[in-house]
Image (cartoon, grey):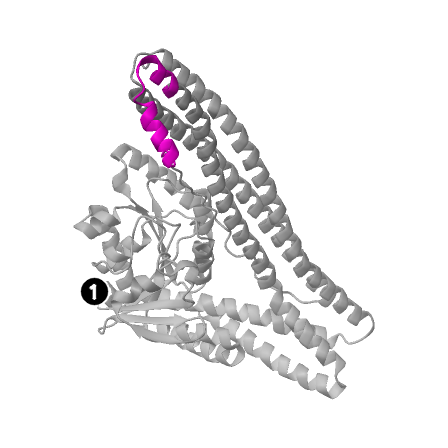
Amino acid sequence: MHPTERDDALQRALAALDDLAGPADREALAALRARLDAGRLRVLVVGEAKRGKSTLVNALLERSVLPAGVTPLTAVATTVTRGSAEGIDALFLDGRTERLPLGALEDLVTERRNPANCRRIAGVTVRLDAPILGRGVELVDTPGTGSVHAHNTAAAADVLESMDAAVFVLTADPPVSASERDLLTRVAELSVTTFIVLNKADYLDPGDLEESLRFTAGVVSGATGRPARIYPLSARAALAGGDPGFEKFRSDFCGYLDSGRPADVLLSAAGHLRRLAGTLLDAVVLQRRAAQMRSGQAAGRVAEFEARLAALRARGEDAADLAGAASARLLAGLNQAAEDEARRLAAELEARLAGLLDGELSAASPAEIERLGRDELARLTMQAVDAWRDAQRDRLEKGLDELDTRLTGELKAELDAVRGAAAELLGIDLTLPGPGQRLAADLRFFYTTREEAGQTELLAGAVRRRLPGEIGRRRAREHLRGEAAALAGSQTGRARADLQYRLSEATRGLIRAVRGRYSGSTDGLASALRAAAAHRAGTAADAERADGELAHRESALRGVLTLLSDGED
């Protein structure tokens, strides 16, 4: 089909869906129409937290506009689009809009200035006069998934549905993770074109970078089902002055915008419209069929299907309870492991200290015994807690990943069963939306080994370190032995407390995601069944009139899908 004909088909499909969709869907349709009319491609810059997404967008813009730093920053999706009068348009969750100067951006979109989106911002649009934006593109800096802030992962998942194309940002070090692979699969399903960036390439030497590239290529191919071009680069170096890898990526990306963008705008719009029309058609077909089955065995089959749908909705709460119970088991394992590690580490530190005191510190002064001995204890403690932390983090992440995989698989199986029940009991085919993006849990923590002492201990330490001869050395040794046990317990405890918090936050996010998956898959159908019940309870004339309206709506939706299918030729 000629592009002009395809665009005409899309415009007619848009107009038809405007009449058929609800208020929330109409907002998305209006945004889609604006992009179609302008020939503008919406490119999401996607990835886990701290992969350098904001810095990459800044490098493409050739100026530092978006906040970037060493902690997870982006809390709200930020769209950057072309505008000669530079500034910010902030949309709030209550529907208000506010125009602000560019300098207010950090107050709106960063976790530091807008923690947990306490300002209740729905989205931010930055208008800039930047060369790349003149190529018919809007860039979207998304919150990082898998950050220590679970609400950021949810915000990132929400904005995925609006993408046309994507730049997926990975890093050379650390390499691509299992959760990134899952996110990449989701992005590949929604994006018409995906660029893969391997950022922070300057962290590795050439040999290690080549190995990272090979590993990443294998993961990307497995996740997307097709080979992909991967661009190793340093966004930080590009923004600071120049980077050959970034220049290659920018050249290819700009070439794509010039040549591939027009067709991809149409292709992506058709995909968005097709998904919406399919969801609306499911509800209409179910409502119409259920309303027609008014008595006897037919009504019984409707009731049976309704019961199966209600059972599926109820299992959403069962799945949430299961997630909570599984998290409690992970927590119990963490607590036991922390107790075991504290005892093991205390014994190790005591043995090491004994060797020091009998060896190189045997003739040292009290002050040297305390200073050098504690430095060694702190070093060993940090080393041991690092290793324990890594092992526990891996265990928790593996446990959450296995739990999420299990729950996702169970929901898919249950949706298949509901589709089968719809065909068997009602004689209709439903598409039913499947589970959305999986939760990616990133568990991070910090600890400190600094000595914490009150005024009494500070005074006692000063006196102890000045005691003469063997008396002072004996007191210093006794103090260090007490320090060994205290360090083992306190630092393992710090690690456990922080991991407990991260596990709790990740579990809350998973439970929200589970409930959202079940409700998202069933709410529209449940609403259709309630409407059908109201029609069955009415008069025959009312039922006939309602069926005529539904038949017209069904015909219109099927016409939209036909228009979109013809547009693929």
Q: Which residue, as the protein is rendered here, is positioned at the far right?
A: 296
Per the image, is 502 magenta? no
Residue 223 screen position, x and y as percent: 45, 47
Q: At 75% from the left edge and 69% from the top edge, which residue is drawn?
A: 302
For the residue pair 442 and 520, the one nearer the viewer reads as: 442
Viewport quadrant of the C terminus: bottom left
Per the image, is 460 magenta? yes
Residue 97 screen position, x and y as percent: 37, 75
For the residue pair 423 and 113, the one nearer the viewer reads as: 113
Residue stretch in magenta: 450-476
| Residue 220 versus residue 567 in the image, above or below | above
- Quarter residue 1 falls in: bottom left
Q: At 57% from the left edge and 58% from the top edge, which residue is drawn?
A: 517
* Residue 230 in view: no
Report the amino acid beneath label 1: Pro
- Quarter residue 387 falls in: top left
For the residue pair 241 and 197, the one nearer the viewer reads as: 241
| Residue 41 versus residue 318 in the image, above or below | below
Q: What element carries label 1?
A: helix
**Would you say 521 lies left or right of 356 here?**
right
For the residue pair 320 and 333, the one nearer the viewer reads as: 333
What type of secondary structure mainly makes up the magenta span?
Answer: helix
Q: Please state the total of marks drawn on the protein image.
A: 1
Q: At 23% from the left edge and 74% from the top edge, which residue is drawn?
A: 85
Q: At 28% from the left edge and 36% from the top edge, which residue is drawn?
A: 204
**Would you say 468 lies left or right of 541 here?**
left
The residue identified by callout 1 is 131
Residue 402 screen position, x and y as percent: 56, 42
